[in-house]
Amino acid sequence: MRNMYLLGLALSLASHSVLAQNPPAPLPPKDVFVADLLKQMTVDEKIGQLRLISIGPEMPRELIRKEIAAGRIGGTFNSITRAENRPMQDAAQRSRLKIPMFFAYDVIHGHRTIFPISLALASSWDMDAIALSGRVAAKEASADGIDLTFAPMVDIARDPRWGRTSEGFGEDTYLVSRIAKVMVHAYQGVSPALPSNIMASVKHFALYGAVEGGRDYNIVDMSPVRMFQDYLPPYRAAIDAGAGGVMVALNSINGIPATANLWLMQDLLRKDWGFKGVAVSDHGAIIELIRHGVAKDGREAAKLAIKAGIDMSMNDKVYGEELPGLLKSGEVPQSDLDNAVREVLGAKYDMGLFADPYLRIGKTQDDPADTNAESRLHRSEAREVARKSLVLLKNQSETLPLKKQARIALVGPLAKAPIDIMGSWAANGQPAQSVTVFDGMRNALGQQGTLIYARGANITDDQKIVDYLNFLNFDNPEVTNDPRLAREMIDEAVKAAQQADVVVAVVGESRGMSHESSSRTSLDIPASQRALITALKATGKPLVLVLMNGRPLSIDLQQQQADAVLETWFSGTEGGNAIADVLFGDYNPSGKLPITFPRSVGQIPTYYSHLTIGRPFTPGKPGNYTSQYFDEANTPLYPFGYGLSYTDFSLSDVSLSAKTLKPGASLTASVTLKNTGKRDGETVVQLYLHDVAASMSRPLKELKNFQKIMLKAGEQKIVQFTLDENDLKFYNAQLKYAAEPGEFEVLIGLDSQNVQQNSFQLL
Ligand code: NOJ
């Protein structure tokens, strides 16, 4: 059977036109095919399949091809064009068994056309928009010969000090789980074996977002109930949606590193959840088991990882160096190796690579003449999605939208920032193709109005931070400071403001500040920019802050100084046009925060779904021994789910179709949503539940459903949600997932704080 397949493959390699006329016989079913191939492999070839390596200085191209042809590499990441990948696939086809390579990449929020960062995508609360971003990414990445993405990243993030907050979809279990499913379907389509789809490898399994203190790579220590209730569901949702891969987290969980965690990788992932795909370590994670203090040397590290079920080792040599000896001594049974190889081959089968190793690489003559060609981008899709991801946080006296006839001072270090606007993990996005805020406003104004630009400040004047950020990107230092004195730059900006009707200040973080290994102890806008904002405020001109950042920032003072605040996150290739659409009112903002904004770093954690406590803070009654910080307001600055529009909406009381719910039955909760303003607009109606008395303390509120609704000015609509017992279930102290009879409050609002309320009994 295998020989027939190889014959077909050889023919297809000899001539693609022959392949087109005589497609090879369909492959046998996956398990038969993989078992047959496994039988033919030597131990070295098997170990070779477990090696996933990055193209880099220590692995020059010539050496890689040699290694591949010798059957010593299973897949690579970080090569991003068909022309780069083809010679590697050719080398694989010269290897004894011609097992195809796969090519992976971090396609997190777009590939060539960069979409808003994940946190911004979540802000859209628009599953179609999010799906579109994933589809376009899959299309563009597959057209560049990429077979697998290390995404979606679904780590729940509740501590914004963590730089990777930007890469995930926020703090809420339900919202992130919905997005996890959407993203897997978007990347993989009906099957990851089709040429314009790619395989999804969900990460970082598990709980990486809960690193202690928000410090990257730190430990995670968490109760089982919290794990199951809050942090694990998004990974599960991705796996249930069919994600072909899982990337294992770098952190330990209650003392056991994920990479060596038998409970996590075997009992939970494989046995309980039935995951049948490939498990990939994170970068260098196996050898790091030594530094975690659970392995005394590489040999023990390799043994722990393979036994845990880490199928592929990313960028470390330890499997190659240690597995032969471990197998020989019998410390690692052959079956452990075979299990790992089976998953790698199975994933390649699922990616369609055994049927055609050149599925996504195509023929040389079809390669784009210019890989960065404009025609390869999907600008209108990116602009559409980016507009939906912007969140209006404040709009006093209708400062926004701006008039196109106005004289506008555009200031701030991020107004002309083609690299930063793409956000971190910008795959193959080209800064030269980014539309900055300056470009976008210019485009929108055309011949009208006046735009007076001044930089106003550097991102930060702290040289140590600049050096750190540039060290992160040492190939191409990204943060370049204007050599002028801070005072000179501010004076120039103030002069611009004085000549203008309104000031737009684009401020926040450089993209590297919200990235892997970019944890912060402060959530402040850097001092150089705070000084700029204060100086602009002093001019008395209406001040609009356009925020660019990858995490919630503590902007209490700045939002008081500003008349309007628009959160734009890092909005991607078309970000500038999308921002201009909102600033000038060509699009009415509809985004809602997927993460709480604290007033200060000291308030963390501020997630909205906090468990009930015995002495909750009672506003207006200070000093009465309730849970509070006495030196600051106890509410967040902006709650989860918050975001304004240029129109106004009202919500009626909540009506329920019944006051009791029997197990197995359902009831309907309805509200009337009315657009009471003068413009058409969209908002998100959010349904939360609260289990009033249960066997354990339950969250004050938990998001259970939402609908994004468009209404014309003056229009109203009844919005209905169906609830059943499944919505009421939770993991109890024995980790049993069940609903408990009793009272449930239904809370419906346009954010998590201001809600209408009703209640029913579960019988
Ligand atoms: C390390 C990161 O933690 C992970 O998310 C990423 O996929 C790999 N590097 C590969 O770039």
Image (cartoon, rainbow, N blue to C red):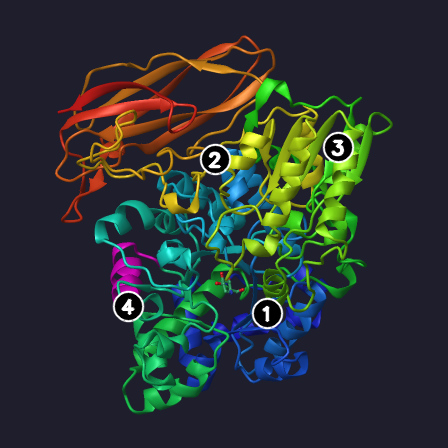
Q: Position of residue 545 (x, y in %)?
A: 62, 34
Left or right position of 690 against 238: left
Residue tagged by mark 3?
Answer: 497
Left or right position of 532 against 26: right
Point out the tag, 2 or 3, that comes first from the N-terminus: 3
Q: CA distance from mark 1 to mark 2?
A: 53 Å
Hey, which quadrant is residue 311 in on the image? bottom left
Point out the tag, 1 or 4, that comes first from the N-terminus: 1
Q: Amino acid at mark 1?
A: Gly
Q: CA distance from mark 2 to mark 3?
A: 30 Å
What SS does tag 2 mark? loop
Camera sees residue 145: yes
Q: Are marks 1 and 2 in contact (CB under 8 Å)?
A: no
Point out the tag, 4 or 2, that comes first from the N-terminus: 4
Residue tagged by mark 2?
Answer: 593
Q: Residues within 10 Å of mark 4 (few under 14, many from 20)?
A: many
Q: Nearer the viewer, residue 568 or 237?
A: 568
Q: Position of residue 84 (x, y in %)?
A: 69, 69
Residue tagged by mark 4?
Answer: 256
Q: Main secondary structure of the magenta part?
A: helix
Give the label, 3 or 4, closer to the camera: 3
| Region of the chain picked out in magenta, as a range | 262-275
Point out the tag, 1 or 3, that comes first from the N-terminus: 1
